[in-house]
Image: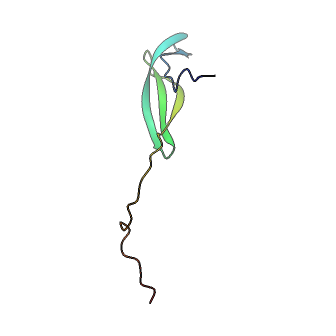
Amino acid sequence: MEKSFDEFNASLLYCRKCGRAMPVRARLLLILPDGELYDYLCQGCGSSLGTKTESAPVQLSLIKPGSLGPRSGGN
């Protein structure tokens, strides 16, 4: 089965204070080693309605030969 989406963002979530589905905005809370943690806030009253963790893209770091300094001679 093909993947139809990678990730999604909520545009409406139910707010208990407002009593209906409300538009939300995402606020970055934390930058974690494995991704970023977002908080969804109601645009009507500002209540927190949920969280989402986005996975960080895989980053590869290449080490060039000789970039770690000279090797010890073994004396």
Residue under the point 47% across and 40% down: 56
Q: Quadrant of the C terminus?
A: bottom left
Q: Residue furthest right?
A: 1
Name the foreground residue: 54 vs 43.
Answer: 54
Residue under the point 40% across and 59% down: 63
On screen, 3 above or below 21? below
Q: Position of residue 62 (x, y in %)?
A: 41, 55
Image label count = 0
Q: Position of residue 8 (x, y in %)?
A: 51, 23
Q: Quadrant of the N terminus?
A: top right
Q: Position of residue 38 (x, y in %)?
A: 47, 32
Give the left or right position of residue 12, taking residue 73 as reference. right
Name the foreground residue: 62 vs 36.
Answer: 62
Name the foreground residue: 54 vs 6.
Answer: 6
Q: Position of residue 16 (x, y in %)?
A: 56, 16
On screen, 70 above or below 21? below
Name the foreground residue: 19 vs 7.
Answer: 7
Give the left or right position of residue 45, taking residue 19 as reference. left
